[in-house]
Image (cartoon, grey):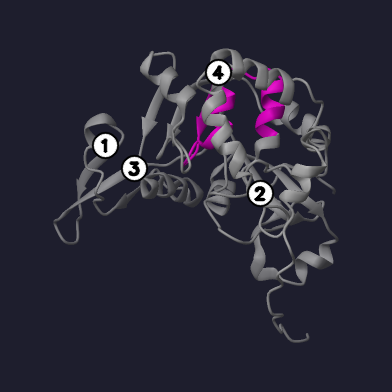
Amino acid sequence: MSKRTSLQEAIAQHVQDGDTLYAAGFTHLIPFAAGHEIIRQGKKNLTLARATPDLIYDQMVAAGCASKVIFSYMGNPGVGSLRLVRAAIESGELEWEEYSHFGMITRLQAGASGLPFLPMNQTGATSLEAANPNIRRVTDPYSGKEVITVPALNPDVAIVHVQRADENGNAHLWGIVGEQKEVAFAARKVILTTEEIVPESVIRSDPNRTMIPGFVVSAVCHVPYAAHPSYAQGYYDRDNEFYLEWDKISSDPVLTRQYLDEWVFGVKDRAEYWQKLGQEKQQRLQVAALMSEPVNYGKY
């Protein structure tokens, strides 16, 4: 049975006020379109978990969607701190938990494995233990040495953006692979957005690239350009200019509100958003084809 639906319907059905939401993706394939749809639908009191909140959580916090953030680095990549998330934390408006990058991924791995926690070797971020009581030490029963433990993370909803998927949710993704697979298995529900919907035969032609299997997916949404201003390897480039621009926008509450009014509430969906960017921006973000060498899987 097809799991294909519109992004609007997927968010309305699967994201509820008070949920713990994990928007996956590291550097690229960040699901901005889904975040904007959550803002448009006025979802509230969300716990937003993500290794690096990126601009999407800054925007969702600005829109009043969040009551808590869980993260391992809170920054506008290459620019500085996320101004809006940081201000909300410092003012006491937003609860927060911080982990190391490896700590966040270990939490998802525990959740995906059905375990209550997982141990990890001590990292350089030992000061986090003083700020986060969920990071604890136990004695390794085999060596007698101390190890750090972190609790499992099982989000209510994971949102994962991929390059291509079939209508049942079997998905290919490539380029920089982040925590997409782990969060898809850890979450109770998965909303998959994809640049392309392809026949099942395309997915089956390269099974090693199937990072997300359809049996963990709740909804499949065809949303081209869903990752802008981040990028989708092989489809469009990162909009570095916007990351710099957001630092200025987010420093001014009036400019932030104007951005949300124009680029989130002022468009009905991602297609309208992409057209609004204009032809010059679209052309600048185009990427030339660079094909990998074929792999011979043999015949059966």
Q: What SS does tag 2 mark?
A: helix
The residue indicated by pointer 3 is 150
Q: What SS does tag 3 mark?
A: strand
Q: What segment carries the magenta color?
A: 34-60
Question: Is any part of residue 3 visible from this angle?
Answer: yes
Residue 6 locus on image (x, y percent): 82, 36
Inspect the image, locate mark 3, and give the three-letter code of the amino acid beneath it.
Val
Using the image, determine if residue 167 lies above or below residue 207: above
Residue for point 72% across, 71% down: 206
The residue indicated by pointer 2 is 216
The residue indicated by pointer 4 is 45
Q: Residues within 10 Å of mark 4 (few under 14, many from 20)?
A: some
Residue 221 locus on image (x, y percent): 78, 42
Inspect the image, locate mark 1, and give the three-letter code of the amino acid beneath it.
Leu
Residue for point 69% across, 46% down: 217
The residue indicated by pointer 1 is 128
Q: Quadrant of the C terminus?
A: bottom right
Cα–Cα gap, marks 3 and 1: 12 Å
Residue for point 69% across, 81% down: 295
Inspect the image, locate mark 4, and give the three-letter code of the amino acid beneath it.
Asn
* Of pointers 1 and 4, the one earlier in the residue sequence: 4
Q: Residue furthest front?
A: 280
Question: Is any part of residue 222 visible from this angle?
Answer: no
* Of pointers 2 and 1, the one earlier in the residue sequence: 1
